[in-house]
Image: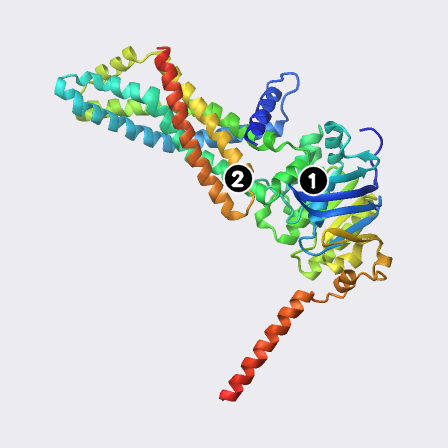
Amino acid sequence: MLVGLAVDLMRCAGRALRPWRPEKPYLRARTISHLAWVGADSLAIVSVIAACVGIILSLQAAIQLEKVGAMSYVANLVGFSLVTELGPLLTCLILSGRAGAAFTAEIATMRISEEIDALAVMGIDPVRFLVWPKFVAMAVMAPLLTIWADAVGITAGGIFSSLVLGLSGKVYFNQIAYFLGFKDLLSGLVKSAGFGVAITVISCWQGFLAREGAADVGRRTTAAVVQSIFVMILLDLFFTALNYIFR
Amino acid sequence: MSGRLESPDIALSDVSVGYGERTVLSGVTTVLPGGKVSVILGGSGCGKSTLLRNIIGLVPIQGGRIVLGGHDMAEIAEAERLDIRRRMGVLFQDGALLGSLRLGENIALPLREHTELTDSLIEEIVRLKLKLVGLADFMDYFPSELSGGMRKRAGLARAMALDPAVLLCDEPTSGLDPITAADMDQLILELRATFDMTIVVVTHDLESLYAIADHVVVLSAGRMLFQGPLARLSASDDPFIQQFLARQPSRESRILGGSWSAMVDSRRESAVGRG
């Protein structure tokens, strides 16, 4: 089932990339609506959490770094932690709880109420209709939201450092610009895209497995979130190790 | 598609039906005649809905053949099977409308997928289909805002969206009040008369059976007990069919009823004795 879903998604990707025969307009509209729901509608919660994490990191860094008189390195710690690790991870944890859980619940409910059978009978591929727009939305929006979270977290950390910790804003942002490279940003974005894809595949797969009524919807949703988090951590380990090896 | 598919016969020969290793129905051989209403009748859990899913192609058969308008569904290529499936309209038990779409969008869905019609033309067709089932004013409603009977009628409108040659209905009157159920039966008869479709209805509703059936298939205990015209059904001497048509309780129920009555009677007597 999971392999079948992956194969179907690759088929959808092949279909979507045919310039000579573009997707049906109603399917494009579904993808755009998912992009808006996953992306724009998650901005507020991602912003709040990223700002809090930026402030927490600057506080934690300040406690240690002021002992050795290296307060300017607060910026390095905040920026590097956010861009390479916490930005993608926290953003995708939010997406897993918000979007992934909703994907599972939607598909599981549709499975139980025969809506997926109805799609198949109408000659509409359920993977193309239901999963592909979610897949595109998560693959595109997870990295974009991560960039946003990085920016908000770093800015919040900078403002807090200058207002409360007495670190000059100019020094903070200069440090960020000097020490953070494109490679760091890219490693975070690759992670978030991988996390987004994993969340979508696991969440939709769990939804399709639902069989036994309303209680199963709850069970599948819980399983999807737990499995998504577990796989995200494994992927994080994998990507970080790759990053270390090819540093 | 090779060959026309206008009100085709559906021929089942020695069809076995089941899930995994478990067989729920076997040896089903019948022809559901084209342009007629065939009713598949049977008690709960006898495999009639599964048989319908086999005909639709949602569940593979365990054995035998299903031939639709001369096309053996197991032997034709996948593309041709999908093409034939597009000429089938299916009404699921609760309508199976997509909850996230408005009624009009639900009915427009097969049109948007399988035709290149303009939006305005699709909207016009959707209005016509909704008018056909008496829901013209409900185009912008979500399925959750409709009653069970309205959802079934909307499901029928969606099943009719592509002007199918075959209409398959799973328990179209279950859970409906007698008047709404009679309306649904009337609608099915009108569709047959107007569009000359092959209609297959799975039900255990006797009133629907008498109202709409031309051809009847009776299933029970994993096998087919009867197949033929409605007029011959009441002449069947099969005990299950006689019991089913007379709406008599089952043997198990009579045993339970007897001991329950005896228990109630004895308690009443002891209560009177104490009084």
Q: Hey, what amino acid is under mark 2? A: Glu
Q: Is residue B63 above or below residue B173?
A: above
B133, B74: nearer the viewer = B74
Q: Which residue is mark 2?
A: A106
Q: Residues within 10 Å of mark 1 (few under 14, many from 20)?
A: many
Q: Quadrant of residue A129?
A: top right
* Residue A90 in the image, given as x and y percentages of width and height: 36, 29
* Residue B194 in the image, given as x and y percentages of width and height: 82, 46
Q: Is residue B164 visible?
A: no
B105, A143: nearer the viewer = A143
Q: Hey, what amino acid is under mark 1? A: Val
Say whether marks 2 and 1 touch (CB < 8 Å). Answer: no
Which residue is at a point 53% across and 38% down the rendered structure image? A207
Horizontally, is A113 left or right of B187 in the view? left
Please identify the quadrant where the N terminus of chain B is shown: top right
- Helix or strand or loop: what does disc 2 sit on? helix
Which residue is at a point 83% across and 48% down the rendered structure image? B36
